[in-house]
Amino acid sequence: MNAERTFTLTGAVAGCLAVALGAFAAHGLKARLDAAALETFRTGAQYQMYHALALFAVASVAARRPSRAATAAGWLFVAGMVLFSGSLYALALTGAKVLGAVTPFGGLCFLAGWAALAKAAWRQDG
């Protein structure tokens, strides 16, 4: 599967899951979690959606000019969603504070993904 198709499909699935998890938080967890835990869960869903949409940008760049930078951006966004959003979901649901130590690594993946996407887009001119 090429990068365009991979990241379009992954973005669509991640977006669908972000909507489902956001709805789950709003309706299924509202009575079970305190306000701080609920906000933590919502933050995970919000950042997952942002980066699901970012995968469509990666797919677009990869379609016009495939590059290692574009592919790296896509996988960094996926890793960020797993590490950042996943750790926030787990933290909110379990209260295990140690999971908060994983979250910054996901944030770093997001930052690196944006930098890689910028590099890929910058190189599109030639």
Image (cartoon, rainbow, N blue to C red):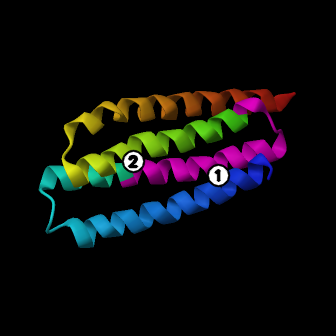
Q: Which range of residues does the magenta coloring cover?
A: 45-69
Direction from residue 36 to residue 82 in the image, left or right: right
Q: Nearer the viewer, residue 103 or 96?
A: 96
- Residue 99 among those drawn in magenta: no
Residue found at x 18% / y 66%: 30
Q: In the displayed image of the protein, which residue is found farthest to the bottom?
A: 27
- Residue 27 place in picture, x, y as percent: 25, 73
Residue found at x 15% / y 65%: 32
Q: Main secondary structure of the magenta part?
A: helix
Residue found at x 36% / y 33%: 102
Measure how far apart labels 1 and 2 are at the Cα level.
20 Å
- Residue 92 place in picture, x, y as percent: 24, 51
- Residue 49 among those drawn in magenta: yes
Q: Which quadrant: the C terminus?
A: top right
The amino acid on which the numbered mark 2 sits, given as a three-letter code, is: Gly
Q: Which residue is mark 1?
A: 56
The amino acid on which the numbered mark 1 sits, given as a three-letter code, is: Phe
- Residue 22 place in picture, x, y as percent: 35, 63
- Residue 68 place in picture, x, y as percent: 76, 31
Check disc 2 and report its element: helix, strand or loop: helix
Above or below 110: residue 11: below
